[in-house]
Image (cartoon, helix red, strand yellow):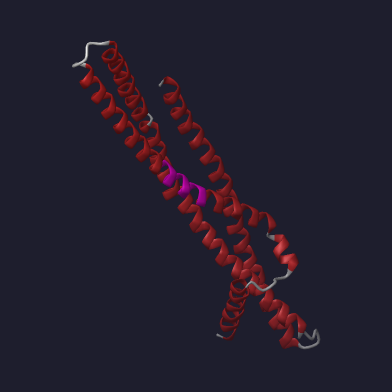
Amino acid sequence: MVSRMQKKFWKTKQVLIKVTGKKEDEHVVASDAELDAKLEVFHSIQATGSELLKIIEKYQLALNAVSLEENDFGLHLKAHAQQNSTQAGRMMTATGNALCSAAGQRLALCTPLYRLEQEMDTFTGRAVSDTFLTVNQMEKARTEYRGALLWMKDVSQELDPDTYKQMEKFRKVQIQVRSSKSQFDKTKMDVCQKVDLLGASRCNLLSHSLASYQVQGSSN
């Protein structure tokens, strides 16, 4: 019971250190440099993915609005051209046809954009969310591990090698440190692997979807 309470105490202390932004052991922080770099990549993927979905939605709305206006103006010109047999009437007919054609071509761009939106939405809702859960598990394990390190540091400062009880206490804390480190290392590896896979998957998704958009745009 005492050990569990001490474990919670040092875990809570580590949480407070992180929340208040107090300086942590530079060697411990440096050992997580690669992990923190992966986390920056993940947060970038997370943020830009959400932003891209908003941009695609706005772009589609703009395309629909412009296409509607173009088509209506084109129909308006062609309707008035039927009542005018002069050169001006023929010009209105040609312009009206061009505007209606442009409106149709512009609307055709919505198909690959909609496909991109659906794929990005699935990617964000599944792959990014799954990685986010793994990141949360890792952060909990990291807090446990760093709390255990604080505990061991505190015990070490009062350690008397000639005192059996103190040595026994130190060994118990050592076991806790090893256990929490093992769990942290596992979740850290999971995060690094998932972030790498997430980045590669997003590149493939965008390359494929934007290629379809480019082909559609070129054909228009």
Q: Is residue 165 visible?
A: yes
Across and down, in percent, residue 152 comes to 70, 77
Kindly give the residue lying farthest to the left in the view shown.
83
| Quadrant of the rendered image containing residue 118 | top left
Q: In the image, is 44 to the left or to the right of 26? A: left
- Closer-to-camera residue (145/39): 39
Q: What stretch is highlighted in magenta?
A: 47-56
Q: In the image, is 125 to the left or to the right of 48? A: left
Dominant SS of magenta comes to: helix
Tell me if residue 3 is in the magenta stretch: no
Q: Is residue 176 visible?
A: no
Q: In this view, does 109 lie above or below 141?
A: above
- Closer-to-camera residue (133/51): 51
For the C terminus, give its image quadrant.
top left
Across and down, in percent, residue 192 comes to 60, 51
Q: Is residue 216 above or below residue 155?
A: above
Q: In the image, is 60 to the left or to the right of 29? A: left
Residue at the image point whose x is 53% and y is 62% from the top: 137
Across and down, in percent, residue 156 comes to 75, 80
Residue at the image point whose x is 29% and y is 33% from the top: 68
Residue at the image point whose x is 58% and y is 86% from the top: 2
Kindly give the residue lying farthest to the right in the view shown.
162
